[in-house]
Image (cartoon, helix red, strand yellow):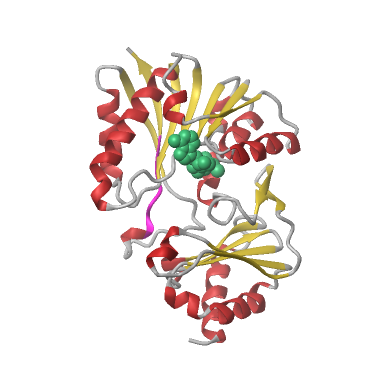
Amino acid sequence: MDEAFFAKRISNALKWREGRFGGSFRIVNAESDFLPGLIIDKYEDALAIQMLTWGMEQQKETIIAASERVLSPKAIVLRNESPAREDEGLPHQTQVVKGDLKQETIVKMGPLRFLVDLISGHKTGFYFDQRENRLLTKEFASDAAVLDCFSYTGAFGVHALFYGARRATFVDSSARALELARENLRINKLSGGEFIKADVFDFLKSGVNEYDLVILDPPSFIKSKKKVKEGEKGYIDLHKKALRRLAQGGSLFTFSCSHHMKRQRFRDLLRIAAYAKADVYLVRELTQSPDHPVMLTIPETEYLKGLILRVLRR
Ligand code: SAH
């Protein structure tokens, strides 16, 4: 494998995405772009690259050179800090290898702008995989009281406010994420935000019936096959609590990004959580953004499952 090899695969990946997602999107999504262990995300003029396997790490310089050749970025940061690297015996490493990168960059996402921390944000800084799903809040946001759980930098709630929500409560355990969420409201000239640093499970305990739209976008609770039972209990508990907070006829956007949670099982768990408490309509099934392509021939490439539900409380 040489620079030409990587340049060809990167440009194939780009060809298919160019013009579809604006200036910020995932260019290389590992297996789905025939480059297992390699992630390349584009944040306007900057690239954030992750090498997640030993093999890709060995090709570091070649990959950087090929990315420069095909994508001509102004800056490149290596965000080599995923837990997956520990399994490969690789150290965590964040390094700006080209340009002078500002820690915080503003990216355009459809009608909105978001501040992204390219040095210490989660993953490579922003969750592109929810891009289209956030736009769907439009249908449900008008005059709504919104609860954005596991909000990270607020992308779901910011969309809901933009589409006419009356107010949005952002809940996350990370103070830094909430600080950026607050900024994201400001740069989009939106008001009506409330920012709560808390464990979502605790936050959901008190109060009933107040929100017209609830978003649940948790991190993966099920990290390995051995943890499936425990993780499933977590999902049931989370949804029981969230259902209580929804107003009559309210809507729930809920997601699981765990590889070990199958789509049908996710539905089943929601059914279990709702039994005897609510009648739940399945409005729409959701998946990951197409810049994280699903290959039918590699089922593991589909990881994000989402449902929009309308909830009638009993
Ligand atoms: N919805 C976000 C992405 C969520 S990522 C978006 O659209 O960009 C998951 C978030 O959950 C992270 O920000 C993490 O800090 C937060 N988190 C993880 N466990 C939590 C918990 N128990 N309570 C509150 N927040 C939690």
At which x and y percent is residue 196? 57, 27
Magenta part of the protein: which range? Answer: 301-307
| Vertical relation: 281 (above or below) 173 | above
Residue nearest the viewer, comparing 308 with 120: 120
Q: Does 17 appear above or below 310?
A: below
Quadrant of residue 153 in the image?
top right
The answer to which of 81 and 24 lies nearer the viewer is 81
**Residue at image location 68% in from the left, 34% down from the top:** 182
Is residue 216 in sight in this rendering?
no
Q: Is residue 46 left or right of residue 239?
A: right
Measured from the top left, where is residue 117 in percent x and y? 65, 51
Q: Is residue 127 above or below residue 2?
A: above
Report the front residue among 56 and 159.
56
Image location (x, y in percent) of residue 40? 56, 65
Q: Is residue 304 magenta?
A: yes
Magenta-colored stretch includes residue 112? no
Q: Residue at x 71, y 63 (%)?
A: 45
Q: Which is nearer the eye, 29 or 83?
A: 83
Residue 136 visible in rendering? yes
Left or right of 239 in this view: 265: left
